[in-house]
Amino acid sequence: MNPLRRFRSGGHRPLAGKNPRHGAVPAVEPGDYAGFLAAMLPQQTGAVESHRFGGERVWLKKAGPRHGKLGYHVLALLAATLQLDMLKPVPNPGGDAAIAIEAQRLRELGAAGLRVPAVLAQQPDGLLISDLGQNGRPAVVLLERLEQAAVTGPAALMAAWRDGLAAIAAVHARGLYLSQAFVRNLMHCPDGVIGYIDFEDDPGATLSLAECQTRDWLSYLHSTALLVYGAAPHAAGAHWHAVLESADAPVRERLALAARRMRWLRHLPAGRRWGRDTQRVRAAGLLLARWYGARTN
């Protein structure tokens, strides 16, 4: 999106602009985030889009429909089969409720000193938040950093992977949890700090704190297992257990239980024709079986 143009109107210098998809943007005073949100929301077609407001990059999230139920049924079946409450699906309510949840969670995590986008403006059907980039330098999705590090070698991959572990541990140390702790929702900021995004659901509404935190660890493992297993499974296990030494006992107990009940997943077919999700689940099962073999027998 092109930067918003400044123009004179009486004694003020409101901001206006044009987006090729949305058309002209009504004039908005500098720093008037609520006005910018109100002006842009009716014109935005996508659920999440970035915009320029003056010299600042911002993100607008628009209320959307509730997510389909099929994925939740599949996850519920897996949780029931494995008898693991922490894998129970956490429905995304969609619509205004999802906007309210995200704003509340961002404020909660931000107040705890964690790196999350700032809530700039909010209305029932939309949310305007800041970008995690700094001084013109963008934040990078941690997944991209892991993939780039994997090309360099196992040591570089492990360094980047440990950053993700430490970022999750930092959240838990404050008695909090994430929503979907997949590597795609962790952002490596220009100053090296890991930030967190995507909070449209709240696992704490249906799960205990220990279950929410266990879910965070399993989500991160699931989303990185293919890279880790293919490069440095032994070293990764050492880092995993070292970080989890500081976790609360109920979390460690639930992870050991999950490892015992998920180890059979390592027998899933390895071929690519079964899809990446199957490969990820299989890799997670292989890692858990290796890391907890002597601990869960």
Image (cartoon, rainbow, N blue to C red):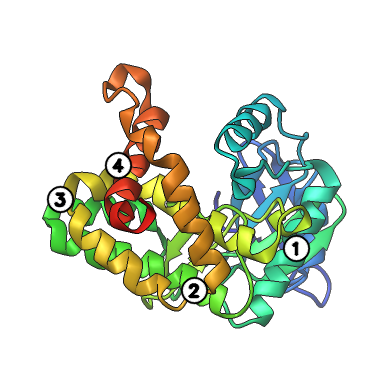
Q: Is residue 91 left or right of residue 244?
A: right
Residue 103, disc: 1
Distance between the alpha carbons at the discs numbered 3 and 4: 22 Å
Mark with earlier residue (4, 2): 2
* Residue 87 image position (x, y, % from top left): 60, 44
Helix, strand or loop at disc 4? helix
Nearer to me, 10 or 136: 136
Horizontal side, residue 64 vs residue 52: left or right: right
Q: Is the residue under label 3 in contact with that under label 1 (CB below 8 Å)?
A: no
Q: CA distance from mark 1 to mark 3?
A: 37 Å
How would you rate the neighbour count of disc 1 (Cα within 10 Å): few for under 14, some for 14-19, many for 20 or more? many
Residue tagged 2 = 247
Query: Position of 95 compared to 174: left or right?
Result: right
Query: Which residue is pictured at 40% across the width and 51% down the height?
Result: 221
Q: Residue furthest right?
A: 124
Mark in front: 2 vs 3: 2
- Label 4 is placed on what type of residue? Leu
**Corner quadrant of residue 210:** bottom right
Seen as rendered, the residue at the extreme front is 297
Q: How many marks?
A: 4
On the image, numbered disc 3 is attached to which residue?
A: 151
Mark 4 / mark 1, whichever is N-terminal:
1
Report how far apart the C-alphas of labels 4 and 1 lie in the structure: 37 Å
Ranked by sequence position, the earlier of labels 1 and 3 is 1
Q: Secondary structure at mark 3?
A: helix
Toward which corner of the image does residue 14 lie, by quadrant? bottom right
Q: Which residue is mark 4?
A: 286
43 or 211: nearer the eye? 211
Do the residues bearing badges 4 and 1 touch, measured as CB atoms within 8 Å? no
Q: Tell me where residue 169 appears, x and y as whole percent.
A: 47, 73
Using a 10 Å C-alpha cutoff, classify the residue at mark 3 as few (fewer than 14 neighbours), some (14 to 19) or many (20 or more): few
